Image: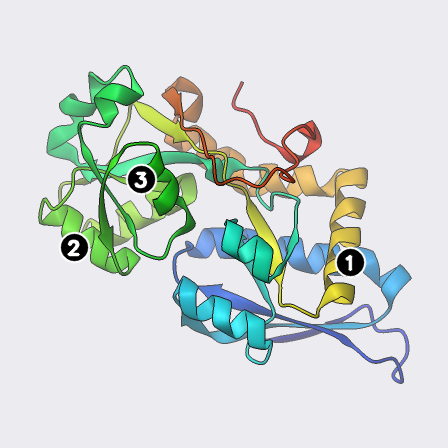
């Protein structure tokens, strides 16, 4: 896939962005990310000139993706839940891509266990159950520090198999991931369900990251995103993609348990309300 947008001068050296195809996002989330990137780059073209954008035709787990981002050959742009390592080794654009909706985690469960979760009224009760999470995922360390019982798997598909086998009791996912993965895996796991009563809120924004040495590309993309925020398109894109999912997940009706994230950078822009979604 190749898009050349904002072309102004054939002699101008193109700013080239190569976005990864994430192994853990739903295709829905990828679609929002693509729309946001292209809109931001187009919004930056008057100031920065021509650009080239394409999607890398391969999927990588998070550890390998970080190494490829550092090289900057196969991929130099990714939208990922932040972590200390990624913020230290790469260039983060500290604007939550999805207004922080991915901080709200709902669970995939064996639907026969719904009654167990419906009675949960506190984090202390929830910690008596075992959750599944990815070995390389940034939230895994946060869950452990918060005192949860954690079972780790290598891939999202593997974790679904482990949930079906009863290796753990719930699998926290971002809203879009939970809804789309339930539909994808239920043919092989007929009792797979989206848990109905609670959500975890873990401050853990998804940012765009660029490989080291890509300072101009980072500045340009951040400028474009700020233009979208200023003219309302950032919010418009968010609501276009996420309002239906928020309603489908019943987020406003759930008990929301906040999990502190001591690994979050002090540079996280938590006070900028324009960046964040609140169900209330």
**Residue at (82, 58) in percent of width and height:** 44
Q: Is residue 49 visible?
A: yes
Instruction: Locate residue 264 relative to residue 53 in the image: left or right.
Output: left
* Mark pair 2, 1: CA separation: 42 Å
**Residue at (74, 53) in percent of width and height:** 222
**Residue at (42, 26) in percent of width and height:** 251
Instruction: Locate residue 136 relative to residue 51 in the image: left or right.
Output: left
Label 3 SS: helix
Task: Identify the coloring.
Answer: rainbow
Label 1 SS: helix
**Residue at (66, 58) in percent of width and height:** 37
Instruction: Point out the tag, 3 or 2, that comes first from the N-terminus.
Output: 3
Residue at the limit of the structure toward the bottom, as seen here:
11
Q: The C terminus lies in which quarter of the figure?
A: top right
Q: Position of residue 7 (x, y in %)?
A: 84, 73
Residue where numbered disc 1 is placed: 219
Q: Position of residue 95 (x, y in %)?
A: 66, 44
Residue where numbered disc 3 is placed: 144
Residue where numbered disc 2 is placed: 161
* Mark pair 3, 2: CA separation: 22 Å
| Mark in the foreground, 1 or 3 | 3
């Amino acid at each position: 896939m190749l898009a050349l947008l904002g072309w102004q001068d054939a002699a101008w050296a193109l700013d080239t962005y190569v976005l990864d195809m994430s192994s853990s996002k739903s295709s829905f989330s990828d679609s929002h990310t693509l729309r946001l990137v292209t809109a931001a780059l187009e919004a930056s073209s008057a100031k920065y000139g021509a650009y080239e954008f394409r999607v890398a035709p391969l999927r990588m787990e998070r550890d390998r993706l970080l190494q490829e981002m550092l090289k900057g050959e196969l991929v130099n742009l990714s939208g990922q839940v932040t972590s200390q390592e990624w913020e230290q080794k790469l260039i983060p654009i500290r604007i939550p891509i999805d207004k922080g909706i991915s901080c709200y985690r709902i669970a995939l469960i064996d639907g026969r266990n719904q009654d167990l979760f419906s009675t949960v009224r506190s984090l202390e009760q929830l910690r008596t159950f075992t959750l599944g999470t990815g070995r390389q995922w940034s939230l895994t360390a946060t869950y452990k520090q918060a005192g949860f019982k954690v079972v780790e798997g290598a891939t999202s598909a593997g974790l679904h198999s482990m949930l079906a086998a009863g290796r753990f009791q719930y699998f926290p996912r971002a809203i879009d991931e939970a809804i789309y993965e339930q539909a994808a895996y239920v043919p092989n796991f007929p009792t797979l369900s989206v848990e109905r009563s609670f959500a975890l809120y873990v401050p853990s924004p998804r940012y765009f990251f660029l490989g080291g040495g890509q300072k101009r590309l980072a500045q340009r993309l951040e400028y474009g995103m700020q233009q979208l925020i200023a003219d309302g398109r950032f919010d418009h894109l968010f609501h276009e993609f996420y309002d239906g999912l928020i309603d489908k997940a019943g987020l406003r009706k759930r008990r929301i348990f906040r999990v502190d994230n001591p690994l979050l950078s002090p540079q996280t822009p938590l006070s900028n309300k324009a960046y964040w979604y609140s169900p209330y």
